[in-house]
Amino acid sequence: MRIEKKLNNSGCVPKKNRFKISVIIAAYNAEEYIKETIDSILNQDLDFQRYIQLIIVDDGSEDSTKDICNNVVLQYPNNVIYLYQENQGVSAARNKGLSYAEGDIINFLDSDDKWGLTTLGNALEYLNNNVDVNVVSARLSLFDAVTGDHPLNYKFDNIVTKTISLLEEPFNIQMNVSSSFIRKSAIKGRKFDTKLKYGEDTKFLFNILKDNPRLGLLSYTSGCYWYRKRSNQNSAMDRTLETKEYYLDTIKNLHLYILESFNGLIPKYAQFMLMYDLQWRLKIPHEKLSFLPEQSREDYYKHLNEIFKYIDDEIILNPLFAQLSPIMRLELLNIKYNKPDCQIELFEGHYWLFSHGHKIKNLSDWYLTQDGLFLKNNKLHLGFSMLNFLGNDVLEPVLIVNNKDVIKANKKIYLSKHYITDKWISSNTYYRFDLKLNAEINTLQIKYLLRNKKCIDIKNISSPVKTNFLRINKSFMKEFRNTSVIRKEPNTYDIRRNSIFDKLKKYLYTIKLLINKKTFKSGLYRSYALLNKNIKKKPIWVFMDRIDRGSDNAEVLFNKMANSNKIDCYFVINKNCPDFKRLNNSYPGKIVEYHSKKHHKLMIIADKFLCSHAEDYLFNPFGKKNGIYTRDLLDFEFVFLQHGVIQNDLSMWLNKSNKPIDKFITSSLFEKQSILDSYGYLEEEVLLTGIPRYDNLELSQKNNTRTIVIMPTWRPNLVKKSATKDDFVNSNYYKFYNELFSHEDLKDLLNKYRVKLQFVQHPRMAAKFNHYFSYSHIELMNDFSYSDLISNSDAILTDISSVSVDFAYLNKPVVYIHNELDQIYKNAVYNPGYFSFKDSGFGPICLTVEDLLKSIKVIIKNDFYNETKYEDRINNFFAFRDNKNSERVIQSIIGSNDVV
């Protein structure tokens, strides 16, 4: 019988057996959300005063949580209990609340979540009508920063509330205690495991369902648990992944505990629970565990491998575990049977991947990502990536020209490696194709080549991720002079010569854009391209550094090229920055405002785009709205001048699949080789010339003074939106430099030898944190020229910033500060690269403030001259140090210096 809401006019409730449901909330610093959470209980359609007990356990909050809760106690003194304890964790708080619970049914509600307003009444009605069931759960839906359904919501019916047996339907598992209602009689004195920081709710619920594996499932319309997904929740998860408890304690006190709860024969629902939780762990990059001692890592992997031996094959292969790729499932079977087995066999007309007698994947369904699709200078550039297994030669994408000629990739590189536990199981491999189009090529097909013998059709190919093709309906189209390349099907391209009818369609498409208000601007750009793209008097080169600043490699090269009689050169920059006025005074008419109409028109007709940075908005300023209608107009050669010299591994960002770079400028043979090895570029695309701004550094050496510059690389984790003041003050970054700057020995050194110390933070760091480093003997640098700073300084102290290479180029002392090297790489978009700071570095490595002070003393003692071993390393590193980098760049790009 449904219990309807009835008002209790007297406000008094009999004390004996008065509550049907006790809701326990463990709260810690929950002032922002707890009122909304409490209101979701007060406003239930089930009479709160008559049937519901609310117990709030404050686990040592330091905000206004207590005041909010006490206001509710004053309003409902007979129903609400507020308890305070010193911070002991959520399990201890729930246990304390449980000891005060008087209701027949218990729920544990998180302090930032909430219940749908009909849920408690429907849960109570269900348990009253189903006395043989001890747990009923409701669907879990995400709200706030992220919305959507929980992955396990598949078990709930839209309309019908049902009862299931986990023994008969083991895949309908319930892992979350907060979205469950539990009979108090079924708890039997159990408590949450206070030793378990992660997974304690799953363990508590598992023990109850183990006694009685029948589970009630409220329909979608009968109830909902609203789970708040905050914007900073990913940060909390990142911190979780850096705790030994997440790995060691959870494995021991949850996963192995579940296994040991049965005498050898593990019920399938328990296996599902284990596999569901472990699938997320298997996706954690193994380098995330580098903070653990080696023995702890080995123990963790050993326990994982042991658990897999108890998981049935059918569960490992179950498609409900969406986080498991086919290769991961294959490797789990190998771990389970302690024997590698990976076969490719023909089955019912298709080639399948088999392992231990199981079909893993039809190879025709193996997913292929089309990373790039570009047409420049009548050359078609295609890039694909796929999860690779068994080595590159077993299965790889190829092009079939005119249904007969097989063309293999020009270049293959590993973009990333994938592991299960500590074993490398697969790689995301990038395949690059470059095809010169001619009149004889009519069709291109993409297929898989199996064992270098058999071509297989591909069913699953993505649309191009990066492209300068125009998307019309479902086709991708690109014209070059009198040729059109059309991607009509995911795996097929038509190459055809344009007829008069094709040209007419092009004009009609432009008119269509012009008459639509939303696409009018794009139509204007297409009209401009039709009229001007092929009637230029001279080649057009567009130069750019950052949006808001020049003084980098592009400006240096522009200064050399600006007055050329053979090439029209333009420099693009934000009109509101100081460098715009400075440059415009020197080159009137050649300095173009970023995002202006002139800028956009120049990008459409440009022959070359030369830039020191590689963000997408620089080489394609049209954005998403106009870009989809204009990207096919961009045909320029992108010359990446670089901002500095690459020492770390930036291949995940600057690889050919991610950036349409046509020429890549380098300064060292070692740097060039690392790019050829790992970035997907061809020999003729990686130019060893030196970066142009180094020419100016040499010219300014005579202006040097006794100045030491400290320039740490930026810390993205400290400037992201979710980062707090406490995050910064408690960071190793702040603690280290605060200790250094306040050290009396540093002050004495600077005063005694009349040395100036300048502190240069990344612009985003400086804007936010410079005031934390206000010391009379430290000069905080804000508005300055990098070239002047480097030229006029005598030594640099940095961590892994490439600015150290600039100082080394001038043979100035370098000191590396590596007190938190692992932390820097963990939060960076790059990884350690070819450059060994220990064996090839241009100066000593310091781990402590004391080490750094000693190195500063050595620099001063040596009168700011480098030690011989560091001079030798510098001479060995650079290919050129002759003030002719700009000339070499121009020569390498066009084969001549006559244009200057």
Image (cartoon, grey):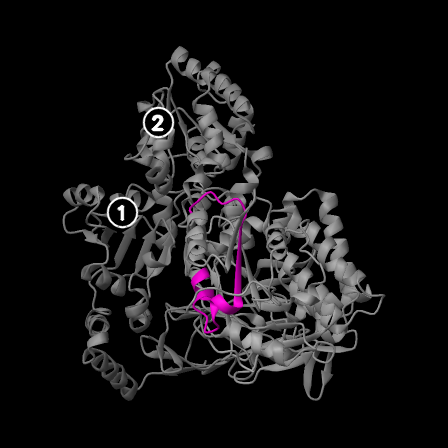
Q: Residue at x 48, y 14 (%)?
A: 861
Tell me the residue at 56%/74% (across/down): 123
Work out whether residue 33 can be spotted: no
Q: Which residues are magenta?
A: 38-64
Residue drawn at 51 percent across, 83 percent down: 402
Element type at mark 2: loop
The reply to whether the C-beta atoms of the residues labelled 1 and 2 are less than 8 Å apart is no
**Residue 322 position (above or below residue 608):** below
Residue annotated with mark 1: 548
Dot 1 or dot 2: first in sequence order is 1
In this orientation, which residue lies closer to the viewer: 634 or 760? 760
Q: What type is the residue that disc 2 sits on?
A: Ser
Residue that numbered label 2 is attached to: 774
Q: Which mark is residue 176?
A: none
Pinpoint residue 415: horizontal percent, then vertical percent.
56, 59
Residue 106 placed where, x, y %?
Answer: 60, 65
Extreme residue in the right direction: 263
Tell me which corner region of the image, top left, top right, bottom left or bottom right, holds residue 754.
top left
User: Few, some or many C-alpha atoms within 10 Å of disc 2 (few <14, some 14-19, many ≥20)?
Assistant: few
| Residue 640, image x, y percentages | 39, 52
